[in-house]
Image: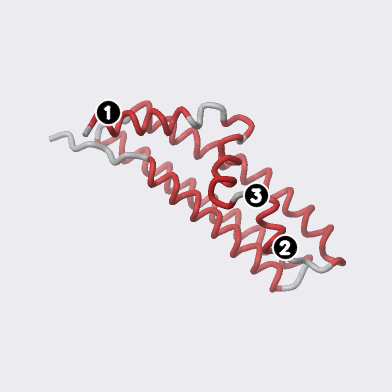
Amino acid sequence: MKKYFLITAALFMASFAYTQSNKDEITLMQAAFGMDKQSVVAEFVKPSPAEKDAFWKIYDEYELKRKELGKQRIALLEEYADQYLTMSGVDAAAWTKKVIALQKKTDDLISTYFAKVNKVSDGIVATQFYQIENYILAAIRAQILQKVPFLPNKN
């Protein structure tokens, strides 16, 4: 069983080896939704012609910041893979605290950009942005959680 978890973890982490360009995040998006992220957002968020340029300018700014947090998420997954079999209780708790802090940063980023989008569009567009970003984030988090093995007991 440990061997299976190790192989799964190794394969999963190997898939994130080339994340400097967010290639694997794009792969996750395409696997989950069949298209790139901006296309998914464009299918769901419908700013009026008068709001469109302002919305996409803010969205591009948001994406730059979100991708930076995505790189941090990948780094945490790589850290987990490196320490998977040797992680102590103290190390596990420290790693989990980093994950929780990063999730909070990600959630805060979405909230901040909801407010920015709401300033340049109506509440419908801002809410569509908020909904799709949270939906995508939840789908990616679920895919990651399905592939990352639980820490083994040290008993």
Instruction: Give the camera-side residue of 70 and 145.
Output: 145
Left or right of 108 in this view: 145: left
Residue name at image x 70 percent, y 53 percent? 39
Q: Which residue is mark 2?
A: 117
Badge 3, how many Cα within 10 Å: few under 14, some, many 20+?
some
**Disc 2 + disc 3, Cβ < 8 Å:** no
Q: Are marks 3 and 1 in contact (CB under 8 Å)?
A: no
> Hey, what amino acid is under mark 2?
Val
CA–CA distance in space, label 3 to label 1: 34 Å
Residue at horizontal 27%, vertical 28%? 85
Quadrant, the C terminus: top left
Q: Which residue is mark 3?
A: 37
Residue denoted by label 1:
85
Q: Residue at x 61, y 36 (%)?
A: 22
Q: Which amino acid is tagged 1?
A: Leu
Number of other residues with Cα within 10 Å of mark 1, as a class: few under 14, some 14 to 19, many 20 or more? some
